[in-house]
Image (cartoon, grey):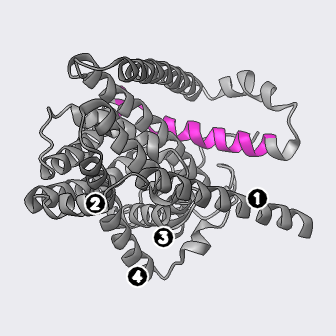
Amino acid sequence: MGYHRHVAASGKTLRVAISLSLAAILLVLFLRTLDFAAVGRAIAAAHVGWLVVATAAGLLGTPLFRSWRWALLLKKAGRPSALQLNSATAIGFAASTLLPARAGEIVRPVALAKTAGLPVAPCLASIALERLIDLVTVIILFVVYAIGWAPSRMGGDEAGRFELLRRSASLLGLGTLLGLAFLVFLAAKPERTDRLVKPLLKPLPAKIGAKLESILLSFLDGLGSLGSLREVLVVAAASLFLWTLIGFQIWATMRAFDLVFPFPVAFFVLTWAVLGLAIPTPGGVGGYHTAVAYALTGFYDVSKNTAAAFALVSHALSFVPITLLGLVFLVVGGFSLRSLAAEPKPEPWNSPGPTSPDAPPASRPPA
């Protein structure tokens, strides 16, 4: 037992070290050629009204609208209140900002499980499902941009990179859609999981296979909560609205810096922001800034100092308000980020773990 704890602690330490190192390297790359005085002047000259609009859009999207959509994916686990959902979402984003290695992906579902009395496994699975839906949505918005609003005049290098991004987005989107379609296929008839997936898990060590099976079943139950075409369309529409709202936040921030582009250009910047945030640094620090600044300088000839000022302010508007709100919820709820970020042990769907009073009984038979 002591050995396994030591190995787990060493693994966490390594992940933290890698996360902080990546943040430091990317920050150096982002800052090394900037004129800090020019960046400061650009920030000071930003239009406050547009920044207020961008901040309001960010808070409307996260946690409010994101939490409402999350409830749709948790129908089979229980019915947490709007306050519990908003609290967990804000706490999760605060954890992603303040802790390395994308800790918010664990903290958010664990916080909801604790406050709403839900089993951890379906809460964790709902985050994985949410991420897949988000990925497809961002790719769709990028394709909308690429069809009608891509820069018409790009040099050889920029044109080549843009084409690579377009092809990568298309392939990733197609692969994700196929993956979602396969999961929907399994969710429609649970017995298909036994026939198609369990044989693939048998060669694995028993504990790993059992854990993967438990996660998969929880994932499928999350999809199963979308039991009708109407519910699927509602989640799809909610996702498009959410990410369009995030795009509006980016567009309003661009307007604050007198960067006047057609609205769909915000989807292009958003795509780069998502790529930067995919690097597991605390709050996307370094990755977000480098990617967003490059999107503006490399494809739209924005000066590097103005692009840097935009990236700094855009990142702050996206993370500072929600982090402060999350810290308030942490204090009120009596939680600590360290305890919430501890590695949880998801319960199988058929375990007698804590459940919400409104939660339905487990829908799957024992394996």
**Residue at the location (70% across, 59% down)?**
345
**Dot 1: within a 10 Å radius of its alpha carbon, few (fewer than 14), some, or many (20 or more) residues?**
few
**Which sits earlier in the primary sequence, circle 4 or circle 1?**
1
Q: Are marks 4 and 1 in contact (CB under 8 Å)?
A: no
Kindly identify which residue carries mark 3.
115
Where residue 231 appears, x then y in whole percent? 35, 34
**Which sits earlier in the primary sequence, circle 4 or circle 2?**
2
Res. 317 mark: 2
Identify the amino acid type marked 2: Leu
Q: Which quadrant of the figure has residue 89?
A: bottom left
**Residue at the location (13% across, 47% down)?**
255
Q: CA distance from mark 3 to mark 1?
A: 29 Å
Q: Which residues are magenta?
A: 209-232
Q: CA distance from mark 3 to mark 4?
A: 12 Å
Kindly identify which residue carries mark 1.
11
**Dot 3: within a 10 Å radius of its alpha carbon, few (fewer than 14), some, or many (20 or more) residues?**
some
Vertical order, 146 against 300 (above or below):
above
Where residue 8 appears, x then y in whole percent? 79, 61
**Residue at the location (23% across, 56% down)?**
60
Kindly identify which residue carries mark 4.
332
**Which sits earlier in the primary sequence, circle 3 or circle 4?**
3
**Which sits earlier in the primary sequence, circle 2 or circle 1?**
1
Q: Nearer the viewer, mark 3 or mark 1?
A: 1
**Which sits earlier in the primary sequence, circle 3 or circle 2?**
3
Identify the secondary structure beneath mark 2: helix
